[in-house]
Amino acid sequence: MVTLLDTLKDQRPRHPEKQHRPDQPVLKKPDWIRVRASSSPVFNETRNIVKENNLVTVCEEAGCPNIGECWSKKHATMMIMGDTCTRACAFCNVRTGKPDALDGDEPRNVANAVAKLDLNHVVITSVDRDDLDDGGARHIADTILAIRAESPRTTIEVLTPDFLRKNGALEIVVEAKPDVFNHNIETVPGRYLTVRPGARYYHSLRLLERVKELDPTMFTKSGLMVGFGESRNEVLQLMDDLRMANVDFLTIGQYLQPTKKHHRIEEFITPDTFKSYETAAYSKGFLLVSSSPLTRSSYHADEDFARLRKAREQQLATH
């Protein structure tokens, strides 16, 4: 029976809600977007550890362009609560549909993989689970606690769903004490209806602000994709909104279209523009900014956490 269900799942469209949409042109990537596949033996070692522990990674599911570099350094972002999301964002390549039940062994399996990879810093993300009463908050918290028990020196970053209409869910995650709480704002408010229709811009802002109210010492982080047709002024206003929510760390990267059925790329943003966004963001008070065409939420997350902590120490020393 399990084999039959798995086979049926593989035959279903990865994005059934997008099948009726007209095809969108997939633009040729400019030279500054190109990446090379990895032939490193460490890449294969990382992949084997992931598979042995029956884990899903956002690196694979979202088609991240940096997987070769990251896995060659034993950096893998674990995606928990299954491989099927209950949302249908127009930019995302993660499978959508009705998810399976939670795997009670998953927190322990993630903790085992983190220990085997000997990670200094780990990023745990997840699919949205609107089908669960708490949006999966307890499962996220259990994963944090399992990693703490197995690898007490490893710092932990969570990249969470928005917990829309899940009262008390955020508090469960914050109480588990991740070192970094990340929730991606994704795009400017004027693009939400077409890019992120299941979410609410101001709810995401309030979620990030609430983290700081619950624990002012916890680092907060958010990510933005550009290339959807947003204006520079919209990006600058979004930065101001995130700073009003006391967000510490901002990442900005180029949106890359996964398939012809996903939202089209309106523009490839130049490296010079990314640099100008970085300069503007620092001027607005972010402790750390990562802004480049290939920046992703968990790209260089371990090095960035060290920089983030140092930036806070320097800030406190001058006040």
Image (cartoon, rainbow, N blue to C red):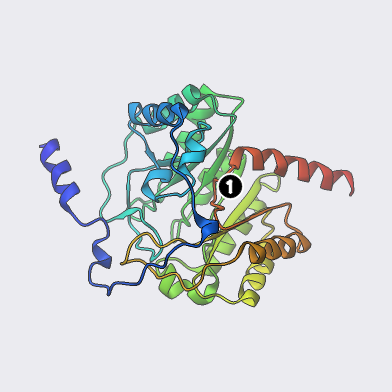
Report whether 88 appears left or right of 240.
left
Q: In this view, does 102 lie above or below 267?
A: above
Percent across and percent down for residue 228 are 49, 71
Rendered residue at 19%/47% (across/down): 10
Up-down: is 279 above or below 267? above
Residue 42 in the image: state x and y as whole percent. 47, 27
Toward which corner of the image does residue 120 lie, by quadrant?
Answer: top right
Secondary element type, mark 1: strand
Q: Residue at x 44, y 56 (%)?
A: 166
User: In the rendered view, would you say 285 is above or below 50?
Assistant: below
The amino acid pointed to by label 1 is Phe
- The quadrant in which the N terminus is found is top left
Judging by the rendered image, the residue that carries numbered circle 1 is: 181
When asked about the image quadrant of residue 87, the answer is: bottom left
Q: Which residue lies at the image location 52% right of the left edge and 62% below the top edge?
A: 186
Q: How many numbered discs sit on the rendered protein?
A: 1
Farthest residue, direction right: 318
Q: Where is residue 221 in the image (x, y as percent from the top left)?
A: 61, 52
Which residue lies at the image location 54% right of the left edge and 50% below the top edge? 297
Closest to the observer, 259 or 18: 259
